[in-house]
Image (cartoon, helix red, strand yellow):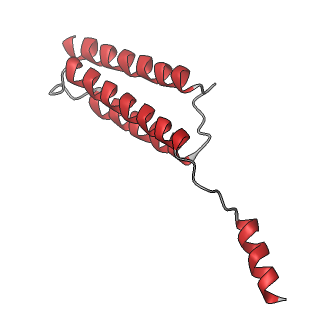
Amino acid sequence: MELYYTAIVKLSLGFICLIFQINLLGKGNLAPSSAMDQVQNYVLGGIIGGVIYNQDITILQFFLVLVIWTIVVFTLKFLKNIIVLPKISLMDDLWVLLSMVK
């Protein structure tokens, strides 16, 4: 019964972290809107899925890993909003190439 209790608590913590990240990032749902969101979803799913049934990892350790991952996600989002790189689309590159041909 102890295995089930621990797994339920870990799964609940994972869902709470997921909901927390969705709400604080300002996303309306879990669907990724960028490549960074996709990677974030994969890593969070891997963390939750890999830890749920592992009895060697305590609930406190799992909670700390979730907190660390949440801090990493928010830091990357903050840096992404501060550092604005120029966006060059494929159509811009094609237009430059076509103008060079003439």
Residue 14 appears in which quarter of the rendering?
A: top left
Residue 2: x percent and y percent? 20, 12
Residue 21: x percent and y percent? 48, 24
In the image, 54 versus 69, the foreground residue is 69
The single residue placed furthest to the bottom in the displayed view is 102
Question: Residue placed at 37% from the left, 35% from the top?
Answer: 72
Residue 58: x percent and y percent? 18, 21
Question: Residue placed at 57% from the left, 53% from the top?
Answer: 85
Q: Is residue 82 above or below residue 20?
A: below
Judge from the rendering whether residue 65 lies leftward or rightward of residue 85; answer left or right. left
Residue 96 appears in which quarter of the rendering?
A: bottom right
In the image, 23 versus 56, the foreground residue is 23
Residue 57 appears in which quarter of the rendering?
A: top left
Judge from the rendering whether residue 102 lies leftward or rightward of residue 75; answer left or right. right
Q: Is residue 46 above or below residue 56?
A: below
Q: Quadrant of the C terminus?
A: bottom right
Question: Residue placed at 59% from the left, 25% from the top?
Answer: 26
Residue 1: x percent and y percent? 22, 10
